[in-house]
Image: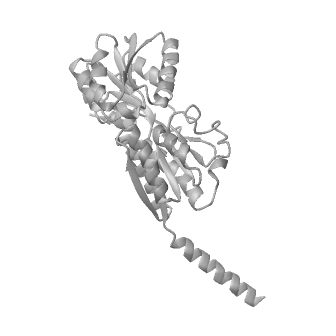
């Protein structure tokens, strides 16, 4: 018996040592660089470090290019990672279409169901994929627009019609705007270079411009800020990181916190061996209000005191 116990102890020590020396490879596909997406990636990296999990991250950025987005997946397949981290909808879709022999965790995907990633939010249909949704609380966004620009009658929205998540958000905006007796004017783009002209096209057609969690538009949000500042047209956005870049306000999830929570999901798969197909889609319900006083003044907006008081972050 003593010999058996000694053998079992030795095996346990070997197993523990093997785990301690394990270095995981995580391949990352990210459609474009901007603060919100970068914050999610950094959150995942930091969470694994906190947990003492040794992981090498191979980061691939498509720079908003659809062809590059697909090519990245071929590169990732050659890397044979332990897990694929897909940040935003385009990368998640490309990964899901081609990678079936290793786990995929996505984050920052607006509508995983309409994007074809999962069957429903509770059931990933036995696939090798799971992750987190950042579906915008559009009712709260419309309420914020009415609060900050109470005289507004028409919302102008800039989005990339080629991003499935953005199309879903536009329809949701229309639904919520109709309930609030507001109209919606659309300005679509194909790439980030079109943001400036799209914003200009809304001058005279809209009383406020709204930018959803559209990766293409957010990557060039400064172009919209410039137009809105020049024309005293308020700019409200769906991600708090863009407020620091010159928008008036946003009520949204903290994308770094979303990255941390995504990191927890990654750890469960890598270390605990949990099957992605058994993990429901997760959400981050902790919403923050960020406001930019300087931007508001530049765009002719007087922020209500009640809005200022409840803001989690104020940029002077």
Q: Residue at x 23, y 26 (%)?
A: 226
Q: Is residue 246 above or below residue 129?
A: above
How many labels were placed on the picture? 0
Residue 120's spot in the image, x, y percent? 64, 36
Residue 198's spot in the image, x, y percent? 31, 21
Please tell me which residue lies in front, 38 or 150.
38
Q: Residue at x 47, y 57 (%)?
A: 78
Please tell me which residue lies in front, 22 or 232.
22
Residue 160's quadrant in the figure? top left
Residue 2 in the figure: left or right of residue 133? right
Residue 255 in the figure: left or right of residue 228? right
Q: Is residue 36 visible?
A: yes
Q: Is residue 81 above or below residue 41?
A: below
Residue 301's quadrant in the figure? top left
Point out the residue furthest to the left here. 230
Please tell me which residue lies in front, 209 or 285.
209
- Indicate how the structure is coloured in the image: one colour
Quadrant that contains the C terminus: top left
Residue 92's spot in the image, x, y percent? 50, 42
Q: Is residue 256 above or below residue 178?
A: below
Point out the residue furthest to the bottom here. 3
Q: Is residue 301 visible?
A: no
Residue 183's quadrant in the figure? top left
Residue 72 in the figure: left or right of residue 193? right
Point out the residue furthest to the right here. 1
Q: Is residue 15 above or below residue 64?
A: below
Please tell me which residue lies in front, 8 or 84.
84
Residue 17's spot in the image, x, y percent? 55, 77
Quadrant that contains the N terminus: bottom right
């Amino acid at each position: 018996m003593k010999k058996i116990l000694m053998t079992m102890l030795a095996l346990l020590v070997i197993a523990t040592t093997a785990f301690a020396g394990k270095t995981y490879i995580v391949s990352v596909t990210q459609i474009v660089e901007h603060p919100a997406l970068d914050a999610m990636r950094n959150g995942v990296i930091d969470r694994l470090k906190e947990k003492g999990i040794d992981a090498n991250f191979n980061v691939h950025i498509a720079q908003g290019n659809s062809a590059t987005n697909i090519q990245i997946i071929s590169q990732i397949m050659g890397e044979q990672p332990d897990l694929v981290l897909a940040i935003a909808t385009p990368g998640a879709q490309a990964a899901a279409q081609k990678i079936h022999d290793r786990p995929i965790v996505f984050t920052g995907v607006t509508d995983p169901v309409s994007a074809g990633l999962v069957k429903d939010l509770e059931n990933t249909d036995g696939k090798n994929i799971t992750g987190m949704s950042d579906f915008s609380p559009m009712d709260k966004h419309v309420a914020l627009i009415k609060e900050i620009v109470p005289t507004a009658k028409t919302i102008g929205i800039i989005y990339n019609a080629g991003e499935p998540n953005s199309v879903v958000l536009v329809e949701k905006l229309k639904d919520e705007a109709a309930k609030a007796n507001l109209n919606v004017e659309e300005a679509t783009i194909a790439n980030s270079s079109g943001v400036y002209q799209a914003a200009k096209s809304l001058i005279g057609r809209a009383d406020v411009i709204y930018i959803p969690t559209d990766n293409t538009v957010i990557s060039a949000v400064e172009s919209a800020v410039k137009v809105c500042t020049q024309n005293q047209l308020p700019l409200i956005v769906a991600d708090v990181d863009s407020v620091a870049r010159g928008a008036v306000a946003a009520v949204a999830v903290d994308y770094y916190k979303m990255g941390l929570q995504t990191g927890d999901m990654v750890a469960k798969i890598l270390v605990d061996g949990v099957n992605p197909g058994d993990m429901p889609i997760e959400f981050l319900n902790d919403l923050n209000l960020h406001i930019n006083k300087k931007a508001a003044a530049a765009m002719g907006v007087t922020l209500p005191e009640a809005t200022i008081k409840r803001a989690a972050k104020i940029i002077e």
